[in-house]
Image (tube, rainbow, N blue to C red):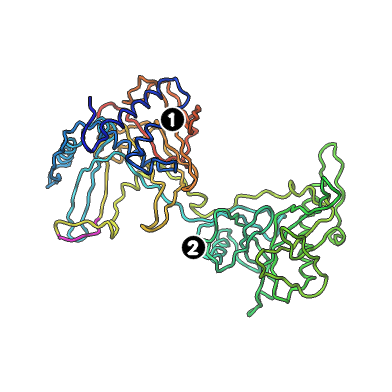
Amino acid sequence: TDLSSSPLSMNGRLAREFGRLLAQMWSNSHESCVPTELKSLIGQQRPEFSGFQQQDAHELLIFMLDGLHEDVNRAVYPRPTLPDVEAQGRADAVVAKEAWGQYLQRNNSRIVELFQFQIRSEVECPVCANVSVTFDPIMYLTLPVPKPPHSIKLTVVPLDYPRVPMQSVDVVIEKGATFAELEEQLWVQLGRVRGDSRFVFADVWSNRVDKIFEERQRTSEILTSVVLFAHEVRLPAAVLRPGAAVVSFVPVVFKRERKSTYSHSYGDERCAPPRILCVVGEETTNAEVSNQLLALASDLLASAAAAATTPAPGEAPAAPVPAPAALGEALEFVTQADSYRRGDSLPREGPFLWDSSRHMLRNLAVIFLREDMVEPLPTCLPEVLNGRSGTGAGGGTATTLHQCLLKNAEREQLAEEDAVFCRTCKGHRRCWKSIEMWNLPSQLIIHLKRFGRDRIDGPLTKIDTPVEFSVDLDLRAYLAQTDMDASYELYGVVNHHGSLGGGHYTANVFVTSTSDDGEGPTPPGGEWFNFNDSRASQASVEDLDHRAGYILFYRRRAKRRL
């Protein structure tokens, strides 16, 4: 009987179809429901929702609430044109009541009764200090989520690895910084002073170096697929002298020679994390490179030998590992190796010649000719430790819903593009603005602003900062009228998992019986469920994902309107 026929509505079609979907969902005759007709109806009004591209759940929710409101709007059409309500020195309660009464003359529906409420907005001119107070109706509360400092996650490979384990670090640094600046910040974050070594940053995958980043390159060039390592590399004495020659950083891979399972041939298999050496023009000799490779191989073999000295019960001790001085027959050093060719044996004499101009990155390789020497390596190398991370790094320091509410209530100065016209001093001003909740609805929707831009023309980004929200929520501290009971209870969460391009929506909902009208506290006997596409499974409060939480639904405990 409340269906509207105004041109602003869908002539009740949206309300009827939504009602049919609810009846189908609560009939207990379907494991899942496919809202094909409802989706088609929405797509007729909003073409962006007609296809199968991922759209914003918050935008869909607001479209649904606005559409349902217009379909059941009791206000007579055409709607009256009413002047703005001005305070003119009157008490806030009087102005708020008048503004709400005017609003109901144009918008009067069950949706308004359940979801809409008023905020008190105060704008102060920075020139003439004139203060303007208005009471505006809103359907939901959008809260800012603190954006974490920009950080880069990497793994530090220390000079003495594997005697000293690697560590995972989040380095807080400005976007677009160079790798030279990243290195400086890494030293600071590790609490160390740079001496005769430096960090070389590389993309490492499957125990090989795919790319070495130069100091002048920007960290913004790090693709999402990059697994960034910071290799500590000792610098030769020649590099530390003034006017030193140009240096090159050469990746080293470690392979073991293995006999094929299906033939009598032998192949090479990478068996340990790669390392990086520093060479100086033609000053570095093949003998010096061989000595460095021998030292690296000896450190790895020492780890393997340590593991081999304690065999499992019933197992025979592993074959003894040759001493470093006798490793010559058990190792082969290879230069210009890549994924497709074994490379050439490293000469024993002469200057070390390295062709760094090739399109494909080439490696030095240490090949262990005895498979048993390095058999324990995959299990005996030390695990990566969690190292020092900068403040706010690692996806963002967790915040709370109350901190988001406090941030929303802060007094702020409008940006230049948001300047408002001051009627008193007759000019567009960057006014100071503050907002407070004046009253609250029966059903409170809180939208956590996880998507946004740093600037108007900037890229859209997602904020993954975890927001701790509790089942019980008291909003008295955020109300302009502090004598109100503002106790709420959580009953639903829409989650957004993943990134902008490949995200996925799920929901956690506290399900009660069909006799629950949604007013007041939840009745006993309800249970939490997780909804994931066509799958529904039992859940609990502990399963709420505070990093993915995007839209929160709270119900007021008191039945009377606040």
Instruction: Tell me which residue sits at (60%, 56%) in the image.
Output: 228
Drawn side of residue 22 relative to residue 139, left or right: right
Q: Position of residue 194 (x, y in %)?
A: 61, 66
In which quadrant will I find the N terminus? top left
Residue furthest bottom as drawn: 243
Q: Earlier in the sequence, mark 2 or mark 1?
A: 1
- Residue type at mark 2 is Gly
Residue 193 sits above or below residue 489 on the image = below
Residue 252 visible in rendering: yes
Count of labels shown?
Answer: 2
Q: Residues within 10 Å of mark 1 (few under 14, many from 20)?
A: few
Bounds of the magenta segment: 425-431
Residue 388 visible in rendering: no
Instruction: Tell me which residue sits at (68%, 57%) in the image.
Output: 208
Residue 339, quarter of picture: bottom right
Q: Position of residue 89 (x, y in %)?
A: 12, 47
Drawn side of residue 231 relative to residue 117, left or right: right
Residue 442 sits above or below residue 301 on the image = above
Q: Nearer the viewer, mark 2 or mark 1?
A: 1
Q: Which residue is mark 1?
A: 34
Q: Which residue is mark 2?
A: 176
- Residue type at mark 1 is Val
Residue 148 sits above or below residue 105 on the image = below
For label 1, the SS is loop
Instruction: Tell me which residue sits at (72%, 55%) in the image.
Output: 162
